[in-house]
Every structure is written in C-alpha cells, then in structure tokens.
Amino acid sequence: MTQYRPDKQAAEKQGPESRRGRQRVEEPLLIRPWAVAKVLAGVIGVLIVVGALANYAIFNLAPHPEHDIADVLKRFDLGHEPSIPAFYSAVVMLASSAVLWFLAKYDHQGEKERRTAWHILAFVMLGLAIDEVVMFHEMGTAAMEKFGLSGPFYFSWVIPGFIFVCVFVAVFARLLLKLDLRTRVLFIVSGLLFISGAIGMELIAGVIFDAAEDEAAALRSVSHVLVQAVEEGLEMLGMALFLCALLDYVNLAGLSCWLRRDNCASDEVSDVS
C-alpha cells in the first residue's frame, strides 16, 4: 500500500506555500518470485532451443566451424563463450549474488553466523558468474590432462569440481538445516539441478567424446548436441530456481525495499525494512 508521510524537517525550512501540497510518498518495491520464475523459464526455453540449433548448424551445416556464418552462430551457441546464453547465466548469478549481499546486510532473523554465510555465498555466486564468462574451470582440465583420464572423466575438471561441491555442502549444511522447510527444499532442488547439469551431464559428454574418432566427430554428433542442451538447461534452471528461492526468502523474512520520493521529485530508492 502506498503511504504518505510528510517530511516535517523539510517542511519547517520552507514557507507555507511551498509546504502546501508537498508530501513524501513511499511505495514498497513488490517482489513476485514466481512471476520472475515464469519469465526466466521462458527465456531459458528460447535460449536452449536456439542454442542447440546453432550448435548443430556450426558443426554440421556451416562450411566449416571457423566460417563467418559459424562465427555469428557462435553468439547463440550453448557451448561457446562469449555468447548470449553465457551472458544470461552470468546475469542471473550476479543477481543472486546481489540478493545474497542484501540478505547479509538486512537479514536479522538469524544470528551473525547466518549473515556471514550469506556473505560467503555472495562471493561464491560472484565467482561463478565470472567463471561463466572466462571459464576458469577449464584450467582444471588443462592441469589434469597429464593424468590421461578417459571415459566419464574425459573432461577432468569434473574431479576438482566434485571436490568443491562436497566441501561446499559440508560448509553450508548447517545454514541449510536452520532455514525454514520451504526455503531448504528450494535450495536443495536448485542445487541438484545445477550439479546434475554441470557435473552429471559433463560425465556423459566425456563418454561421448572418448568414444568418438576425434573431437571434431564428437562435436558433430547429435548426441553431443542433445547432452549439451540438457546440461546447459539444467544449469540455467537450477540458477533461476535459486534466485527465485532467494527472493521468496526475502518475502518470508519480512524484508522489503521502499521507493521514497516527494510528490514533485524523481523516484529514489531509500529504505529497507
């Protein structure tokens, strides 16, 4: 509900005529997590379909993968960076990081330990957003190639990636258990979706690449196109659900942002309650 609260201090400094009709307007910035979820689901659907078609066209229809047409298609390819899908994923992760910073500052439901956990998670999300663009995780594959792994571990970065997931779960299990049931379930489901895509489907992709005659043949295969589409789709859905779960928690925690303005001034974000 819009509330009107006269700014008494400002009114005292102004004459009767200037005070007349000048009131401070405060409006809550409403957050509808599941409306956001519907929009993100639609965007993800478009990105996955277009990205899969672009990936197939690059390696099967274009004269060669480095052709000018292929270069254009790579901007939509699910497995290429920089690309629109990678940009989308980075934006969602940055948005999650921003909400986590908000919770670290204003969530007074729990003890200091919970706010510290929100801070750490904000850094993790920021790191994942950066990695989505610059692909630091590929350095793990380069470092482990000397072990000559094959089969599911063809993309050997999944090993340090799995270790990171185990450490992450161990560190944040306590926070998870202290959250309300609804938020806990949403966090767990989002995490399972993301890990199933990022690591689970990467293991399957490793089998495809290891069984192919060479890397070019693997990239041309329909099975790789489908696996990559499922992989990226699960990652995107996991991150979208996590962002919506955070926004839902903000509502459950009774937190809100307010837009405050004078009736003749421009809007500005002011209070958090």
Image (cartoon, rainbow, N blue to C red):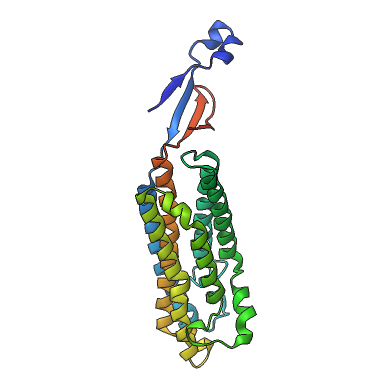
Image quadrant in which you'd find residue 143: bottom right
Residue found at the very far bottom of the displayed protein: 213
Image quarter of residue 82: bottom right
Q: Residue at x 45, y 59 (%)?
A: 239
Q: How far across and how far down the image is residue 247, in percent?
A: 43, 46
Question: Is residue 216 among the parts visible in the rendering?
Answer: yes
In the image, 3: left or right of 94?
left
In front of the other: 172 or 131:
172
Viewer-proximal residue, 125 or 37? 125
Q: Residue at x 59, y 74 (%)?
A: 138
Q: Residue at x 35, y 50 (%)?
A: 181
Residues 58 and 167: in front is 167
Q: Is residue 27 above or below residue 142?
A: above
User: Exactly how many numbered labels are in the figure?
Assistant: 0
**Compared to 241, does 55 lie above or below?**
below
Relative vertical location of residue 82 with respect to residue 221 in this rendering, above or below: above
* Location of residue 81 in the rendering, given as x and y in whole percent from the top left corner: 56, 69
Q: Which quarter of the figure is the N terminus placed in?
A: top left
> Residue 187 placed where, x, y %?
41, 56
User: Relative to 32, is 39 above or below?
Assistant: below
**Where residue 129 sits: x, y (%)?**
56, 59
| Residue 74 in view, yes or no | no
